[in-house]
Image (cartoon, grey):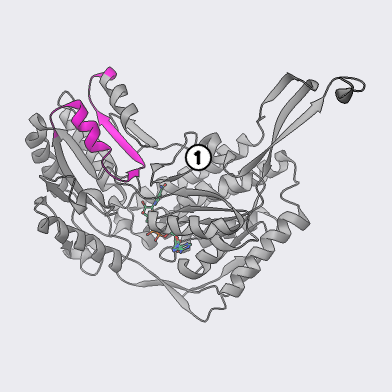
Amino acid sequence: MEQKKTYINGNWIDGTSGRTLRSINPATGEVLAEIQENSIEDTILAISAAKESFYQKRDWRDMDAQTRSDILLKIADKIEENLEEIAKIESMDNGKPLREAEADVDDAVHCFRYYAGLIRTPNGGVYQVNSNFGTMHSYEIHEPVGVCALITPWNFPFLMGIWKLAPALAAGNSVIFKPSSETVLSTIKMFEIFDEAGLPAGTANLVIGPGSSIGNLLAESSDIDMVTFTGSTAVGQSIMRAAAGNVKKIGLELGGKSPNVIFADTDLEAAVEWAMIGIFFNQGEVCCAGSRIIIEKSIKDAFVKRFAERAEKMTLGNPLNNPDMGPLVSEKHMKDVLSYIEIGKEEGAKLVCGGYRYTEGECALGYFVRPTIFDECTSDMRIVQEEIFGPVVTIQTFETEEEAIALANDTVYGLAGAVFTNDATRAMRVIKEIRAGITWINCYNPAFSEAPWGGYKMSGIGRELGTHGLEEYQEVKQINMNLTPGVLGWYER
Ligand code: NAD
């Protein structure tokens, strides 16, 4: 069996914790690879390497933007050259259908290219100001934050990593990256590419191991200037507390329970198709999943009938064969999702379709759950309030626009949301009332490197992607230059 290593200070090393992490293919239960987990001591080494890289060696930080951009473009090219291999690794390790893994890697290529270009464009304002001190030329420059710890989840292992690594590196920071232990293989490939592309040693360091120990150390360490995290809201809260010690900058991309609001005047067939993409894409293991359908009462029955017909037809199978859905990421996660389905039944929601582990044919040994629709749901149910993170969707109805908005906003989360209607004025009115950072009108899920991504309320702090995504990894310095000649004579006045 293949043994994988981690990458610290430009060297491939075995973790020294004495524990081995096994990467499991969730479609078959087979062990794909073994990795020696990193210890606290390894993590301290990685932090020291990043610190030395940023504060002493300064090679990446002080590199001119053009050369840094060239290296980022080289990374993008190498990811593109290895797209098929990375997508296959991702599909086998995470369970997502191969075509979805290919799309993730393609997005990662474009994300690197976007930030490679962005750091060569001017940023920051220039102001000519008059104050009591005379005429001032005031301008701002953006500088890297310093040593950044980046912590990611398992649902889009490669892409979520790149959403952090591309802007953090583009800005000139040195980083320590910790992926989820569930899915480390595509990340190891990513670091092989960093190495080949000539990223200076110590600029990007990889640590692999439990969040509760090494993740927590990264959040806590006073040698780290910033921690950015994508994952569950509960862990985000713990990172926020741990980061308070040295008042680290933080970025948090957390959970969601997003509303998909459908009005009666919409194209029903199109709304069904987008609702499918909203909840069943990536097995429903998507932070922004449209997991709460809130639909106008008059069309609910017709919608549910068609939605269930389409869901029943979905194919499940080995992700490398491109079924509609693959397995959930692990046996434990499958059990968590199935237990939520039991909770839904006990709470009195009406199970319309799915709701069980699927073991037909090539799915016999994997962690597959059929697409599951619960009708007749109410806001007080746990399945409506809590993030399930699987292919499970709830249906609630409304009769007025005000009721739809109230239902849409009735959770602690505020990550995403959508509105379906043919009335453009209403679409704008309702979307503006939804307290969420990522919203769609008459579609669900599209995301772009150029547009900001992040949540309101308990779904997070800060934004990834777009120009905001770069600014998260930068400090802004104000420089005020006196343009008034001679002595000011302030005290003679
Ligand atoms: P998780 O919170 O369990 O783990 C995420 C990462 O945090 C992992 O690397 C884990 O090892 C680490 N971690 C765990 N405990 C830690 C601690 N105490 N200190 C520091 N790090 C720790 O999340 P998950 O199960 O891997 O992913 C699913 C969650 O991620 C869902 O809630 C989903 O909504 C969220 N998510 C959000 C976005 C977004 O953009 N908002 C995107 C993808 C996933």
**Percent x, y of residue 475:** 65, 42
Q: Quadrant of residue 288?
A: top left
Query: Residue at the location (56% across, 43% down)?
Result: 112
Residue at (65%, 61%) from the top-left corner? 223
**In this view of the protein, can residue 95 be seen by the observer?**
yes
- Determine if the magenta segment contains residue 407: yes
Q: Is residue 288 above or below residue 222?
A: above
In the image shown, does 345 or 393 lie closer to the viewer?
345
Residue 204 pos. (x, y %): 62, 57
Q: Which residue is mark 1?
A: 465
Which quadrant of the figure contains the N terminus? bottom left
- For residue 64, above or below residue 431: below
* Residue 10 in view: no
The amino acid sitting under disc 1 is Leu
Residue 187, image x, y percentages = 50, 59
The vertical placement of 74 against 5, above or below, is above
As helix, strand or loop, the secondary structure at mark 1 comes to: loop
**Closer to the camera, 189 or 260?**
260
Crowding at dot 1, Cα within 10 Å, few <14 / some 14-19 / many 20+, comes out as many
Task: Please identify the quarter of the rendering in which residue 94 is found.
Answer: bottom left
Q: Residue at x 80, y 23 (%)?
A: 133
Residue 259 image-quadrant placement: top left
Q: Which stretch appears magenta?
A: 398-425
Tally of numbered discs: 1
Q: Residue at x 92, y 21 (%)?
A: 486
Indicate the position of residue 254 as horizontal and vertical percent values. 40, 50
Quadrant containing the C terminus is: top right
Task: Answer whether residue 376 is magenta in the image.
Answer: no
Q: Is mark 1 within 8 Å of ligand 1?
A: no
